[in-house]
Every structure is written in C-alpha cells, then in structure tokens.
Amino acid sequence: MDGNHTLHRISFYLLLFAVSVALCFVLAPFFSTVLWGSILALIFQPVQRWLVVRFKRRRNLAALTTLLLCLVIVILPAIFVAGTLIQQIASAYAQIRSGSMDIGSYFSQVVHALPQSLQNVLARYDLMDLPGLQERLSAGAAQISQFVAHQALNLGQNTIQFVVSFGVMLYLFFFLVRDAREISLLVRDAIPLDEQHKQHLLRKFATVIRATVKGNVVVALVQGTLGGLALWVLNVQGALLWGVVMALLSLLPAVGAALVWAPVAIYFIATGALVKGIGLALFGTLVIGTVDNVLRPVLVGKDTRLPDWVVLISTLGGMSLFGINGFVIGPLIAALFISCWDLFRRDQHSEEHSDD
C-alpha cells in the first residue's frame, strides 16, 4: 500500500512538473507581455486599494479606473516618446547615408585639437590613420542606425502582433489588479516552504520589483530629461534622441548618462567651444550625476538593500540575457539569491543554538 502511495505521489509530481514546463513554453511568446502586465499591476496595486475604498468595494470599477490611469500616466507617454524617437533615428540614418552627418569628421576635429603629446601616443598605437578611422566610424554609425531602423520597420510590419500583445497586457493588468489579493493567497499557499520563509521571500520579491522599476524609471526619466534639455540648449542635433539614449543608459548605475554627455563635452572643448564644453561638463557632473548619486540610493538601494556593485553587475548580466527586461529580472534574482542564503544562514544559526 505504501509502495503504491509513493508511486502515485512521484507520478503526480512528475505530472505537475511536466504541465508547469509545458505552460512556460505556451506563454514564452508572451513573456514580456506577462512580465510587464504583472509589474504594472504590482506597482498600481496601492492605487487600486485606494479606489476600492472610494468606490465602496466596487472592484471592477476601481480596476477599470486604475487601468485608465496606467494608460494615461505610463503607456501613452511611452508610445509617444517611442514614435518620436523612431522618427529621429530614421532621420539620423538618412543624414548618415547622404553624407550630411559625417561622424568621422567630428572625430578628426577632436584628434587635431589634442595636444601634440597625445597625438604622438595615438600615432604610436596606429590610431592616427584618420581617413581609415573616419570610414570605420561612419560605417559603424550607419550600421547602428540601420539596425535600429530595421527593428522599427519590423515593429511596423508586425503591427498585428504588437496590438495583440498590447491588448493581452491590458487584459492581464485588469484582472491582476482586481484579484491581486486572491492570487497572492493562492501563490502563497502553493509554495512548499515554511510560512516564515514564504512571507520573507514574497515581501522581498514585491519590494525589489517596486523599488527597481519605480526607482530606475524615475532616475532614467530625470537624467534623460535633464540631459536632453542641456543638449537642446546647446543646439546639439537630435537632442530628444540623445536624451532617450541617456535615459536608457542611466539604467546602469555609476556610468549611465555620462557615456553620452561626456563625449559631447569633450568635443566642444576640443573644437574650441570652451564655454559650451565646460558648462556641459559641470552640468553633467553636478546636476545629472547628483541625480544618480542621490535618487538611486533613496529609491532603489534603500528598499532593496543591495550594494551598488551588485545592482550594477546584476543589471548588466540581466540585460545581456533578457534584453530590456533584464534591468528588472537581474536585480530581482540577485536579491532573492541573497535573501535565500540569508535565510539559510539564520536556520543554521538557530539549529546550532538549539543543539547547545
């Protein structure tokens, strides 16, 4: 009898594992859709709870209102910026192809403005072949712009797929926001862990998601906006494009937006525009850099309790594996890893004390 019971139990576990893996394969095409629908629902959950009280427990009306707020605050602005960005990228690609924007000539101006000692160092490493460098830089910039334009064209050609994914995300968001309490209770009951461990890990999961998304997005928006405005004031071509690039790069702690404004400042200084170059360098260091140093620890590090170097490495690793989704997945895995080992350490200490 015991043997049959064990066999049935093992068979059931194998079946449970098989159907779970099968569901993952089924949902794989909509991975990003499910991920961001869940993340947005988690972030807007406090709004839903507040609206439920105001609407006298009418959860459907509260969820619909929360969905509309998410559309107005997050989704529609993101679509507008993405559309404008695609237009600027297409314009930049056309200018590079026509030759009106010569990346190599900009580099040549910077090299010729350097002190002779630095030019000698560059020549020693065979970096003074300016025609060859100009050709490679222009070709590289053209390839990058062509790649981005090709991706934008693919997005336009796959409009039906985009609309379906967008609709699925909104549909999922509505039900996750409305039924969040019931879903969280089901997930908590299904996890085969000690109750204390479950509460700790689920709390850490929610905290890291909220802190990473809200914190990184706020820092990215602020740095991208400040950087874009600075470049616009200095009459840099494609200020919106570079502002968005700075916003995306600011997802990387410590380096981020400086990868854009620092070369521009160096170019201004090297070509004789000292006021513009020094002004941009000071603004980037004292204002844009301060935003990262002040806001990120408050919004991200304080809640996640992750060291900056862990956030940086896990973000880079996550984005290399999962693309833009990795800036959430990477720190989340790192935080859960640290939490699990912290729980293990606590259990070991408690067992040692109980033995004593």
Image (cartoon, helix red, strand yellow):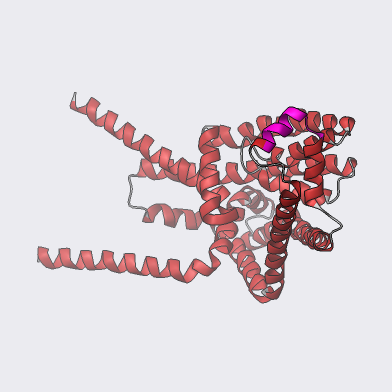
Q: Position of residue 210 (x, y in %)?
A: 58, 45
The residue sitting at 30% across, 34% down in the picture is 347
Task: Answer whether residue 3 is visible to the viewer in this image.
Answer: yes
Which residue of the protein is positioned furthest toward the top in this rendering? 356
In this rendering, position of residue 99 left or right of residue 15: right
Picture residue at 78% right of the left edge, 50% below the top: 104
Q: Position of residue 321 (x, y in %)?
A: 51, 54
Q: Residue 182, position in %: x, y?
A: 49, 57
Residue span colored magenta: 113-123
- Quadrant location, the N terminus: bottom left
Residue 20 shown in magenta: no
Residue positioned 32% across, 37% down in the render = 344
Quadrant (top left, top right, bottom left, bottom right) of the C terminus: top left
Closer to the camera, 151 or 131?
131
**Is 262 placed above or below 140 here?**
above
**Residue situated in front as seen by the camera: 192 or 58:** 192
Relative height, residue 56 to residue 274 (above, below)? below
114 magenta-colored: yes
